[in-house]
Amino acid sequence: MTAPTLPRDVNRAFDAFPAPIGKRLLQVRDLIFATAAAYDNVGRLTETLKWGEPAYLTDETGSGSTIRLGRLKDSDHAAILFNCKTTLVDTFRERFPDQFEYRQTRALLLPVAGKLPKQELSVCLSLALTYHLDRRGKKAR
């Protein structure tokens, strides 16, 4: 699946990033949409801005936790930000301890150069996009 056309306000947010970070985050955006399309229970994503940064929500189904793309002030890496009240970043850290750099319980950092680790990153994105489904399943047991 190809990602939809960028909404004008979201496009401006990507343009506001330094070029290498913006380019890397656009690659992540494409992977978010491709990953979402692989799961029937995720539904159509809402692409919007949260705190002035591109954000991806599963409004249609409520299946996942918000994924936000940005940059941390003290880093030259592209940042994928998650709700810090979830266990997502801890789960990523357990599964991929050496693949990514992490910040507390809220961010996965990606270098702007080199090959995007698509396979590992799509696992992380799928966990975020289905976070509430996984939690509902655990509560039902």
Image (cartoon, rainbow, N blue to C red):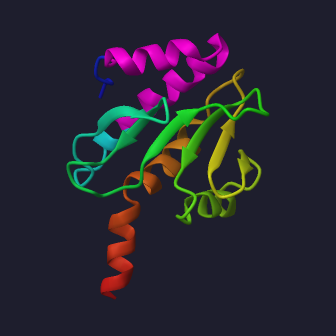
| Identity of the residue drawn at 46% across and 56% down | 127
Q: Is residue 7 above or below residue 82?
A: above
| Identity of the residue drawn at 38% across and 39% down | 56
| Identity of the residue drawn at 71% across and 23% down | 114
How far across and down, in percent of the image, does residue 139 sit?
35, 83
How far across and down, in percent of the image, does residue 46 sit?
28, 37
The one nearer the camera, 50 or 126, is 50
Decide whether residue 9 is among the magenta residues.
yes
The one nearer the camera, 59 or 117, is 59
**Lateral position of residue 91 relative to residue 30, left or right:** right
How far across and down, in percent of the image, does residue 83 sit?
52, 55
In which quadrant of the rendered view does residue 108 lie?
top right
| Identity of the residue drawn at 39% across and 72% down | 135
Q: Which residues are magenta?
A: 6-34
In which quadrant of the rendered view does residue 120 lie?
top right
Decide whether residue 88 is among the magenta residues.
no
